[in-house]
Image (tube, rainbow, N blue to C red):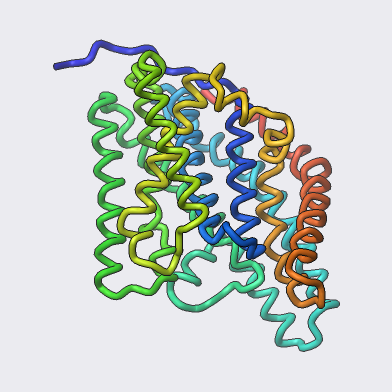
Amino acid sequence: MQHSPAQPCLLKQHNAALDGLRGIAVSLVFLFHADIPGFSGGFIGVDIFFVLSGFLITILLLQENRNRFPSGLGYFYMRRILRLMPGLVFMLLTFLAFSIFYFRSPNDIARQFQDAMIALFYSSNWTRALGLHRPEILGHTWSLAIEEQFYLLWPILLMIISGLSMRYRSFVIGISLALSWGWRVYLLYAGASWDRLYNGLDCRADMLLTGCLLASLLNAGALKSWKQSRLVSSATLSIALFTVAIMANKADWQQPPLYIWQFGAAEFATALIILELVSVPEGILSSILSAKPLAWLGSISYGIYLWHYPILWFLQKTPFSKPQQAVLAALLTLGFSLFSWRLIERPFLRLKERFRRQAP
């Protein structure tokens, strides 16, 4: 049966609860990298970011460009550059300056410069996926590379399918999602390494596409029943939250179940959480995640992600105990992130708004 045309779902320009979700996600990643007991699966914070990125980018493209993507792609790419590059470049320059004083061997210093170039050109995921084991101290930039590669490709692909009805567009996205999952499972049974499965864009695209599918359905008004059927949606949301909590505690990135079904469970659960936050902004979960400390943490989550891993790496070379390293890393990460946000990133964000206003 053909659905009647639905009004697009208009996403608020700023949603504090989504900031709070970012705050949770980046906290999980920090706790995982700091080896805090009980968070062996905290790496799923990255997958929360992936789903959220796919959702936000897709719904903004659908709403801003109204099927006139060719004339708006340049503005989109400029906004991405202005949002992401200043913070990354500042972190890399600081890292290189410190490396010159920290490392004694010219070969070690040269290696850090090479790794910085790998990170700058968003190729860390493939150097790791292909077994080169680079970069090391900047290894966390693999996820930034995946997102940037997605930002490069997805708007073009969305432009191609933008003329389709919501039903067919969502079908194409869903099939693409399933193909990424199937390809990952195939590679797993074909003997691919954990690094290949974990870092390859082709093996992780289903997380991003899950967010894209949610955006396509929500923008077309196809998920109104979520807000209307509160008993069912509340029960489903509870299962989703439980799933994320269990995975953050138990998941292991070097075990087959993660790649067969656990990633799928995490991305579906994250999509349901995002659906709740956007559809029911007055709900209990939205109120919790909108709390100022969480929302504030989420607002600087990009900087936190950029800085936390190299800081932890260098502190692990000190005689401080693990708890002391974690506390020091948290304080230093917050300090550098705040400095980056206020003096580096925010001025460029003002330029970003010019491109938003000019977009058709």
* Residue 344 percent coordinates (x, y): 79, 45
| 23, above or below 13, in the image | below
Looking at the image, which residue sits at the far right?
Answer: 101
Whether residue 79 is visible here, answered yes or no, is yes
Whether residue 54 is visible here, answered yes or no, is no
Q: Determine whether, in the image, residue 295 is placed left or right of residue 359.
A: right
Q: Residue at x 49, y 71 (%)?
A: 128
Q: Residue at the spot x=60%, y=23% of the render?
A: 13
Q: Is residue 253 above or below residue 340?
A: below
Decide which of 318, 357 is in the foreground and name it: 318
Q: Quadrant of residue 191?
A: bottom left
| Marker count (numbered) | 0
72, 262: nearer the viewer: 262
Image side of residue 225 versus residue 286, left or right: left
The residue lying at 27 percent from left, 61 percent from top is 185
Residue 216 lies left or right of residue 126; in this view the side is left
- Rendered position, 274 above or below 96: above
> Which residue is at a point 30% across and 68% down the rendered structure image?
188
Q: Give the x, y percent position of residue 227.
A: 41, 17
**Residue 322 lies in quadrant:** bottom right
Quarter of the figure with the N terminus: top left
Extreme residue in the left direction: 1
Percent x, y for residue 218?
39, 24
Rendering coords of residue 206 (x, y %):
36, 48
Q: Quadrant of residue 5?
A: top left
